[in-house]
Image (tube, rainbow, N blue to C red):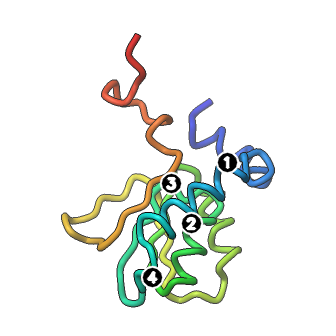
Amino acid sequence: MSKENFYDTIAEDFDSIMNMYDTNRRIEVIFQDFLGAENLKGKTLLDAGCGTGLFTTKAVERGADVTSIDIAPKLVEITKRKNPLLPQLQLQLWSCLFENNSFDIVISSDVIEHTRSPMFRPKK
């Protein structure tokens, strides 16, 4: 089973499967510790590996123009469902490519360990 298919099969249960303490802590680190009180109004933000849109929602609340992508189309659909009235939310598939400097901020949380690249595999 491909990763895309795997994540599509668990998409509806994704939030309950995730460790919400860990997820909320990562949101806190990014939006409080890293970005601080920075106003994101007018900033472009890429949420790469958006999952069900927890980081996307927080970024939109802070005023960012968000593009959310994920390897699993169903997770992107859930992100859209959670943010139905937000015209600045753009949803695209994982395979899309962006020009350099397309975004002011890029968030990619809990993604790198799922990549196939040998560069990111643990060394023995």
- Left of 94 or right of it: where is 27? right
Instruction: Please report the residue visible at 57 percent of the width from the left and 43 percent of the height from the top.
Output: 4
Structural crowding at the residue carrying mark 1, measured as other residues with C-alpha within 10 Å and reported as few (<14), some (14–19) or many (≥20): some
Q: Quadrant of residue 123?
A: top left
Query: Looking at the picture, how far across and down is residue 84, in whole percent?
Result: 66, 83
Looking at the image, tell me whether mark 2 or mark 1 is earlier in sequence order. 1
Where the N terminus falls, by quadrant?
Answer: top right
Can you tell which of label 3 and label 4 is closer to the viewer?
4
Looking at the image, tell me whether mark 3 or mark 1 is earlier in sequence order. 1
Give the residue at mark 3. Answer: 49
* Label 3: which secondary element: loop
Give the residue at mark 4. Answer: 64
- Left of 37 or right of it: where is 85? right
The kind of residue on which mark 1 rests is Asp
Looking at the image, tell me whether mark 1 or mark 4 is earlier in sequence order. 1
- The circle on residue 102 is none
Real-space CA distance between mark 2 and mark 1, rounded to the nearest whole angstrom: 19 Å
Where the C terminus falls, by quadrant?
Answer: top left
Query: Looking at the picture, how far across and down is residue 19, in whole percent?
Result: 72, 46
Residue that protrudes farthest toward the top in the picture: 124
Instruction: Please report the residue visible at 34 percent of the width from the left and 69 percent of the height from the top.
Output: 105
Can you tell which of label 2 and label 1 is closer to the viewer?
2
Give the residue at mark 2. Answer: 55
The kind of residue on which mark 4 rests is Ala
The kind of residue on which mark 3 rests is Gly
Query: Looking at the picture, how far across and down is residue 121, in whole percent?
Result: 40, 24
The kind of residue on which mark 2 rests is Phe
In-front residue for pair 39/92: 39
Give the residue at mark 1. Answer: 8
Looking at the image, tell me whether mark 2 or mark 3 is earlier in sequence order. 3
